[in-house]
């Protein structure tokens, strides 16, 4: 039987070698995936030919379309987290009983810390 310190050093060395081998394999796979899945260059779309040759109108149309898309995306975003949903509010400035119970349970001390009378 060998010395336990020597055995533990051998096992640790083998473990470290396997760890670095696995990390190198992971890095290689990630590098390969980025090369295989990289985006191909996009060919530019030629401008549409109109009869009057108004290229400034096309630019303004594209800019207006980009603004419209940005506004539509902003409109789709969810409401802020801190405000209750519209169906949870029962009246102007009043919260529903479930909402009040939720906040009451958050503010109250845990049952184990309450004092007995």
Image (cartoon, grey):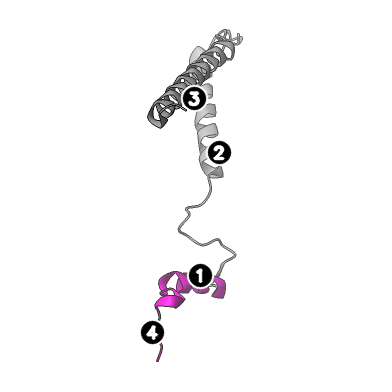
Spatial CA distance of label 2 from label 1 is: 34 Å
**Disc nearer the start of the sequence (4/3):** 3
Residue visible at 51% across and 74% down? Answer: 101
Magenta stretch containing residue 108, yes or no? yes
Q: Position of residue 48 (x, y in %)?
A: 60, 11
**Disc nearer the start of the sequence (3/2):** 3
* Circles 4 and 2: CB atoms closer than 8 Å: no
Residue visible at 56% across and 62% down? Answer: 86
Q: Position of residue 32 (x, y in %)?
A: 55, 12
Write down the residue under mark 1.
102
**Disc nearer the start of the sequence (1/4):** 1
Write down the residue under mark 3.
63
Write down the residue under mark 2.
72
Spatial CA distance of label 4 from label 2 is: 54 Å
Please state which of residues 53 and 21 is positioned toward the viewer in this rendering.
21
Front disc: 2 or 1: 1
Name which quarter of the figure residue 12 lies in: top left
Residue visible at 51% across and 28% down? Answer: 66
Please state which of residues 87 and 59 is positioned toward the viewer in this rendering.
87
**Disc nearer the start of the sequence (2/1):** 2
Residue 56 vertical placement versus 85 (above, below)? above
* SS category of the residue bearing label 2: helix
* SS category of the residue bearing label 4: loop
* Circles 4 and 3: CB atoms closer than 8 Å: no
Q: Residues within 10 Å of mark 3 (few under 14, many from 20)?
A: few
Q: Which mark is residue 115?
A: 4
Extreme residue toward the bottom, this view: 117
Quadrant in the picture for the C terminus: bottom left
């Amino acid at each position: 039987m060998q010395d336990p310190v020597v055995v533990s050093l051998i096992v640790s060395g083998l473990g470290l070698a396997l760890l670095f081998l696995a990390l190198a394999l992971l890095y290689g796979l990630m590098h390969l995936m980025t090369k295989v899945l990289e985006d191909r260059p996009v060919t530019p779309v030629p401008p549409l030919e109109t009869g009057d040759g108004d290229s400034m109108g096309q630019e303004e149309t594209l800019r207006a379309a980009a603004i419209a898309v940005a506004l539509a995306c902003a409109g789709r975003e969810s409401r802020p987290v801190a405000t209750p949903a519209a169906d949870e509010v029962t009246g102007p400035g009043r919260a529903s009983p479930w909402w009040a119970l939720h906040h009451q349970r958050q503010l109250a001390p845990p049952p184990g810390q309450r004092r007995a009378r």
